[in-house]
Amino acid sequence: MRLPWRQARALRANGVLGMNQRNGDFISQVNPRRLYPLVDDKVRSKELAQAAGIQVPELYGLLAIQHQVVDLPKLLDGREDFVVKPVNGSGGNGVLVIVGRRKDRYRKASGALLTQDELEHHVSNTLSGLYSLGGLPDSAMIEYRVRVDPVFEPISHQGVPDLRTVVYRGYPVMAMVRLPTAMSDGKANLHQGAIGAGIDITTGVTGRGVWRNEVVDEHLDTGNPITGVQVPQWDTLLELAARCYDISGLGYLGVDFVLDRQFGPMMLEMNARPGLNVQIANQAGLLPRLATVDALGRADADVAERVAFAKEHFGRASSALAATSAP
């Protein structure tokens, strides 16, 4: 068993970015706090993306006060499926995916049924701030339920995988796909039991994955391999992620996209404090890539130039070469 200081030294030697360093050396340096509301508020993020011509799931309605909960049946009239989200939520907490109806009940991705009262109770809890950042009163948004792209159907369980890209100073530096499992109840959040699989920035092909602390090559529920999957429209996804730097003004952010089988790439949200488990999914540290951007990146580079730079420097082969060349 390694002593803690030896573990810390080993992580450092592999270029792993820790939470304190992320906050102190990067987020606090390039993410002005005045811009946080642009990404913490999912409705504002959606409006920003739409103004820039980036597709987002259609917003069916927004409930901001408790009295509006009684309007829920009217708002949902004629809609077989939808997603309920806290506007200021994080980590997938409070997200409710309804995939259909059975008589007067709503069917969740897991197959469980909710009564109208239970759905209204969930929305009421959302408004009270149960799932919001800091526990403050929140709003509930009802939006379009994304249909999973066929390429992900064999490696997803009752949910839609999302593609998380970390963008630094406008350069996509690392990415992963988060694959829902039965344990995650169809959600794509790793701490709820989803699988994270690294993506080669150059090719858009998936590598090995992680579930909890375990390295996995197959999906837990479907048994299908998660490695070697070519993510469709990869170059477009990289360009869209890079553009989110321009529309948000944040120098270090996580951007989540989904691939809808009908509408293609859609932005779900931006995050000013993206988690660090993308490093685990890729089995690579972020620090060498961030240092490469600081040393060689140009502030005046356009989106196409930043994407080309990322594909040249942050692919799996390039990263391995950089690691072996490191002092």
Image: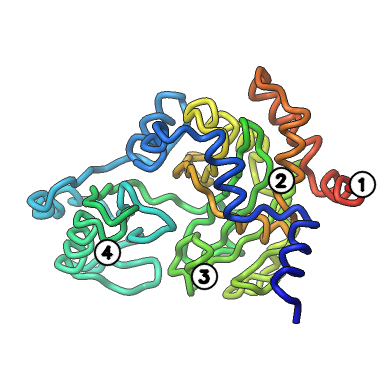
| Label of residue 325 in the image | 1
Q: Nearer the viewer, residue 230 or 95?
A: 95
Q: CA distance from mark 1 to mark 3?
A: 36 Å
Residue carrying label 3: 193
x, y percentage for residue 154?
61, 64
Q: CA distance from mark 4 to mark 3?
A: 26 Å
Q: CA distance from mark 2 to mark 1?
A: 24 Å
Instruction: Identify the residue at horizontal 78%, vertical 28% (top origin).
Output: 296
Circle 4 packing at 10 Å, graded few (<14), some (14-19), many (20+), is: some
Q: Is residue 204 left or right of residue 237?
A: right
Q: Does residue 136 lie above or below 303 as drawn?
A: below
Residue carrying label 2: 204
Residue carrying label 4: 101
Q: How many marks?
A: 4
Amino acid at dot 1: Ser
Q: Nearer the viewer, mark 1 or mark 4?
A: 1
Q: Is residue 29 left or right of residue 131?
A: right
